Every structure is written in C-alpha cells, then in structure tokens.
Amino acid sequence: MVTNTTLKPTATAQLMLPNSFEAENHWYPKALNATIHPMVNFFLNLSKVRIIQRYCHLHPMVQKEKLEEILNYKCKYFLWGGADLINVTSATGKRQMVVIENNSCPSGQKSMPLTDDNKEDGGYRLLVERTFKPYLKPKKGVTRINGDLAVIYDKNPMEASGYANVIADVFQENVHYIPFYNDASEPMVRFENGIMHVLGADNQWYPIRAAFRYLTQRPWNRLPIHTKTKVLNPTLACLAGGRNKMLAAKAYDIFNAEVRESGLKVVTPETIWDVSKNEIPIWVKKMGGQAVIKIPYSNAGQGVFTIISQKELDEFMAQDFDYERFIVQSLIGNYNWSSTSSTGKFYHVGTIPNLKGHTFVADLRMMISSTPEGIRPLCVYARRAAKALENDISESSNSWEMLGTNLSIKYGANSWGSDTNRLMLMDRRDFNKLGLGLDDLIEAYIQSVLSMIAIDKMCKTLIGTKGKFKMRLFKSLNDDPTLVNEIKVQ
C-alpha cells in the first residue's frame, strides 16, 4: 500500500490552536492501532545507569566513565536526530549495528505505537517537552524576541502538523503552521534583521521568536545559518552532517580519533569522500565491484545508488548531477556479494526468513533528542527492502530492490508518497520478524548518540569565537562550489 502524503505547492498557512490534536491525523492507521512490543517498551524505559552497566558488561574495553559522559552530553546545535542503522554480521558471526546516516529532520512519530505510559500525543509531546521547550528558555545576556511560535515544513505534513498541534498545547498559544518549499515563487517565510516572519492564515506577516523546522530539501538555500529567531534544528546542523553526508563522514572520523582510547567508536561502512565523478569507477573497482555511491546532500532515499554490476555502474555514470563531489562507501549485501573493505566483509543479518524462506534487508531508525538530562531515545521503527535478498547475483539483478529501504516516493518537486507496505512497526507482530534483542536496541541507541555528538561537535568547529560561521573552513572540508553557492549565511 502506498500512502499518499502529497504536499501541494499551493498549500496555505494554518493557525494551530491549543487542544486541537487529533491522533488519527498524525499516525499511520497501522501504527495507531498497534500494541507496542514489550521489549521495545522496556528498552525505552531503561535508566541510563542500567544501559551503561549492560553495555560495559558486553564491551569490557569501553570506559564506563566515558560512556556516562557521552549519554549525559547536552548538544548545542544538533538537538534532534534520527539515525538509520543496519544490523550486520561477519563470516565469524561478529554482529554490529552500523550507522548509515543521522538525519536532522527525522520522521518516525507516525510509525511508532504508543508506549504504555504515553499520552495520546506520544512521542510528539516528549520531543516538545524534553527538547524544544528547554531550548527556548531565555539565556542571560540574550535579548528575547517578541513574537509568535511557528512550524515550517516542506515534507511530511502528517508529523509536521502533529508537532504544531502539540507545541500549541504545551505552550498554550496559537502556532503558525507554514509551508516553506524549496524554490517557492512566493515564499511564506522571510527574514528581517535576522528575525523570521511568516505570512499567517489571515494574510498578515508575523514575527517569530522560535520555530520548529521540518525542512528536508536543501534547507540551507532559504533558511539562514545565523538567525535571531531560535530554530530547532538550525541550518548549521544540516550542513555539519545532519543533511550533508560528506561532513558527517568527516565528523565521525574526527570524533572516533577523539574517543579511541575509551573503546567507543561510530561504526560506519568504509567511506571515501571528496570523490569526483570520473574517479568513481576506480573506487568501485577497489571495493570489488560492489559499492554505494551517494550524492552527499540528498535525502529521503534520493541520490543513493547501489552498485553490484558493471551495468549499474554504467547507468550511474551516464547520468548528470547538480553537485560535483560524491562519497563512495563499501556495500553491505549478501555474504557472496558484499564489498571487500579495510574493515573486512560484512553482510546483512536481515529479517527472520518468511514461510517461503526469503530474508529481506531491513534497517532501523532510532530517533533521539538532547534533553537537560542528556540524550534520550524517542521512538523506533524499521523498514524492509521491496524484494528478498538473493544469494547470487547476475548482470540483470536490481540491487536497489534488494537493498533500498527508504519508504519515501517522490512524485514531483513538492509531492511525496510513502510505501507503508514495507514499514515494520515496533509492535507484537513486526518486531519479532527483525530478529533483534534488547542488546541490539541498546547498541543502536549508543551508535545513534555517538553519531549525533560527532555532528554536534562539527557544528561547534564551524562556528568561530565571535559566533560567526567559518565559511573558509567549511570550504576546505567540503570543496563543492555548487553547494557553497547555495548556502544562505544571513
């Protein structure tokens, strides 16, 4: 089943009022009517102390004090993220959770069954109360802006409107719910002296003191890095890794060097960055003919190319792209056709075989947020590929059908749908098919936290002592003129 979540370019502004949240508008029906799996519910309610004790028991080389520091970390810029992870194993049975990416505007609430102690608005309220509300607390020496609250979005209206409703409830004030599309001819958002203004439902402009942002399509080309209006997440979080896979790879590498002695590490596929298009065949060959090529600044399953044959590589090379730099990663597939990398050969654990004996690739989305008590999990869901994992491949094999898990379907510039057939809930039915245990969930959580901190630290690196964006440093780290020319600093 394809759920149509189409965004129409003519969408208008709305004003969300307190006490207007209706659960059926903000969850997929299959999630709203599901019962959360007891193990997932148990995991979400585990204390940090027990998580640390368990993780260090299974990883005796990890420094307990450092892990405690990591879980208590308070992010400055990257406050809300959703890591995509895959469960992999080696020929010797070494299982790991591997980070594919961490998203700065993650979906997930609409796919998460309510936990036993959640209110009707579930994880929406948790994020607003734990993260957004504390983020807006006035700081000493910072002038408070007089203005309203807003949610701006370019995708996923089911969740974006849910956040708008809950923010109205938590703050007990009206909230502007505003579409802000990439390349909109008459945008409903503008900035004056660093303050966001939105065109309200009554066709009047309103200053905004704080905005919850769900912009996924090149947000840096219309949402400035520096704003007086508080924005969660700020554009900086996207450029530093939340929507920039190039900088994320470098952030992970730098962070891993920093924490190496503690026994902790962000686990990722082998990644080659700053690759020009004509260099790609060389790196694919080095990885054994199987690789993943990514446009670093795309999302929602767009701009990712899995390569398992010369035919697929030729098809990729025949295309034209807007950007000039790519990343190439080792491909994790079946044991018989995974990339050979410096870290060895890993392959998908996949789902428990179905009645036909078919195993499917599945990934896990772990949504987390920074709170006054550290980084906490919010919700979890999984997605499976369209077709079963083959033991052997041929020139005619379609790798994306076996390996691609993203549910988003792009119909047009601002028009999206979702293939909910492949959505796997954390309920009593789907969770068992994933073959995951409590320790796997803890591992996924730790990896999500590590990757989030790595990107937040990259954000800090890109801001100077006077609070200004270091464009020269950014260019040296991400030498892609097309991207640099898109960035709106102020």
Image: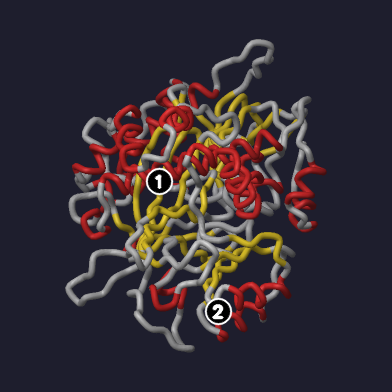
Name the kind of residue labelled 1 in the image. Met
Q: Is residue 155 above or below residue 466?
A: below
Determine the residue positioned at 45% across, 52% down: 84
Which residue in the protein does label 2 denote?
289
The residue lying furthest to the bottom in this view is 395
Name the quadrant containing residue 414: bottom right
Which residue in the protein does label 1 denote?
366
Residue 56 appears at what percent x and percent y? 35, 37
Determine the residue positioned at 73% across, 52% down: 478
Q: Nearer the viewer, residue 108 or 184?
A: 108
The residue lying furthest to the right in this view is 472
Tell me the crowding category of disc 2: few under 14, some 14 to 19, or many 20 or more residues within 10 angstroms, Cα based: many
Q: Nearer the viewer, residue 281 or 305?
A: 281
Secondary element under disc 2, as helix, strand or loop, is: loop
Residue 460 appears at what percent x and percent y? 66, 33
Q: CA distance from mark 2 to mark 1?
A: 31 Å
Q: Is residue 202 visible?
A: no
Q: Nearer the viewer, residue 234 or 434?
A: 434
